């Protein structure tokens, strides 16, 4: 059994390792990824907080390469699942097969590709809701149930799902219940010209790149514990709750623009993820306390997939990002 002093020393060493490791992580990722600093930070925050990410962006923006590189840095088992219209739930979770044993024929569970530490669910909106829902239990409970038997998934466990926002033919929008399981909706935009030039130069030359593992799965699990230990003031928790609450239409105190433009607002998970993400951001930046800036910075990734706009908003050109910006302007920061 560790003494209290030893536990505090181990916690301090883990925090130092995390803070010092950020520069090393950025250095290793820069070997294969150009720019996209905000995207990288948001995925790392989800990783350290133990949340899942939905990654939205056009094809060819290195979504798969980014996720695979992060998995390699943290020495995690990586699996990519290409979601297609004919994909079945058992193709993801696994299935039971009849096998010959010394005792005769027996059903044996064969693990599917979801039994890994980091899952890239590529183009998740290309498969029907029945198959999409195969991820729900795994994302929430970190387990798979087959024939009444529960099979725990390896820890740590993360799902990073990508979707293409442009080509919508033949796609199936994710159910709201599943969207709510994702901590962040990370948006990857096109690179500036100089960054794109660098990408083209790199990818058209023979330059073998080797990503060095910097951490282990045990380190990631330790970081999860540390993030939850970061203190946060009660007024900042209340600020996160008010931000999420202000997005809900026709509630006491709801802003007029929310009542006019929003059909459905963010639930309690949004408040939880705002606080958890803010704690992870504070720790990653070497702070032992949360600032209002941490919550404001993460309002977009946390809220953009939890706010459903109505037809009036679309007709008036008010998108989700506009609504989030208005919410940040309307809900006062602590001390303001």
Image (cartoon, rainbow, N blue to C red):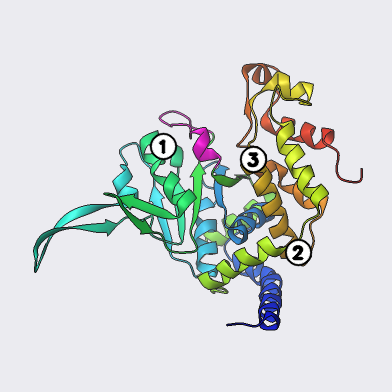
Main SS class of the magenta portion in the image: loop
**Left or right: 274 with respect to 220?**
right
Which residue bears the numbered disc 2? 285
Decide which of 88, 65 is in the foreground and name it. 88
Which residue bears the numbered disc 1? 126
SS for dot 3: helix
Please provide percent x and percent y for residue 30. Answer: 63, 64
Residue 194 in sight in this render? no
Residue 162 belongs to the span the image colors magenta: no
SS for dot 2: loop
Decide which of 335, 304 is in the foreground and name it. 335
Please provide percent x and percent y for residue 29. Answer: 60, 64
Q: Which residues are magenta?
A: 166-180
> Whole-Å distance between the Cαs marked 1 and 3?
28 Å
Decide which of 305, 259 is in the foreground and name it. 259
Badge 1 crowding class, 10 Å Cα cut-off, few under 14, some 14 to 19, many 20 or more, is: many
Residue located 64% across and 37% down the image = 304
Please provide percent x and percent y for residue 194. Answer: 69, 53
Which numbered mark, 2 or 3, is in the foreground of this view? 3
**Left or right: 273 with respect to 98?**
right
Marks 2 and 3, the one that precedes in the sequence: 3
């Amino acid at each position: 059994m560790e003494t209290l002093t030893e536990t505090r020393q181990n916690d301090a060493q883990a925090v130092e390792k995390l803070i010092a490791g950020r520069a090393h992580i950025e250095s290793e990722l820069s070997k294969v990824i150009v720019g996209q600093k905000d995207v990288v930070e948001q995925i790392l925050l989800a990783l350290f907080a133990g949340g899942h990410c939905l990654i939205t962006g056009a094809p060819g923006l290195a979504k798969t390469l980014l996720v695979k590189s992060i998995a390699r840095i943290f020495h995690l088992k990586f699996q990519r699942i290409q979601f297609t219209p004919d994909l079945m739930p058992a193709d993801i979770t696994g299935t039971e097969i009849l096998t010959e044993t010394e005792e005769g024929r027996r059903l044996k569970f064969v693990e599917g590709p979801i039994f890994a530490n980091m899952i890239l669910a590529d183009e998740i909106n290309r498969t029907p809701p029945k198959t999409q829902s195969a991820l729900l239990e795994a994302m929430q409970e970190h387990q798979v149930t087959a024939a009444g038997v529960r099979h725990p998934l390896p820890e740590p466990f993360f799902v990073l799902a990508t979707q293409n926002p442009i080509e919508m033919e033949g796609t199936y929008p994710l159910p709201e219940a599943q969207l709510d399981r994702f901590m962040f909706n990370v948006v990857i935009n096109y690179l500036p010209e100089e960054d794109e030039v660098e990408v083209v130069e790199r990818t058209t030359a023979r330059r073998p790149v080797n990503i060095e593992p910097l951490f282990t799965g045990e380190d990631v699990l330790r970081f999860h514990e540390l993030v939850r230990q970061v203190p946060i003031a009660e007024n900042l928790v209340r600020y996160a709750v008010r931000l999420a609450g202000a997005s809900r239409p026709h509630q006491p105190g709801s802003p007029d623009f929310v009542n006019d433009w929003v059909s459905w607002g963010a639930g309690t998970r949004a408040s939880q993820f705002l606080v958890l993400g803010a704690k992870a951001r504070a720790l990653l930046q070497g702070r032992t306390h949360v600032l209002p800036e941490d919550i404001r910075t993460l309002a977009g990734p946390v809220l953009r997939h939890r706010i459903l706009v109505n037809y009036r908003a679309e007709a008036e050109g008010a998108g989700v990002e506009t609504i989030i910006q208005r919410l940040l302007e309307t809900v006062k920061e602590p001390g303001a």
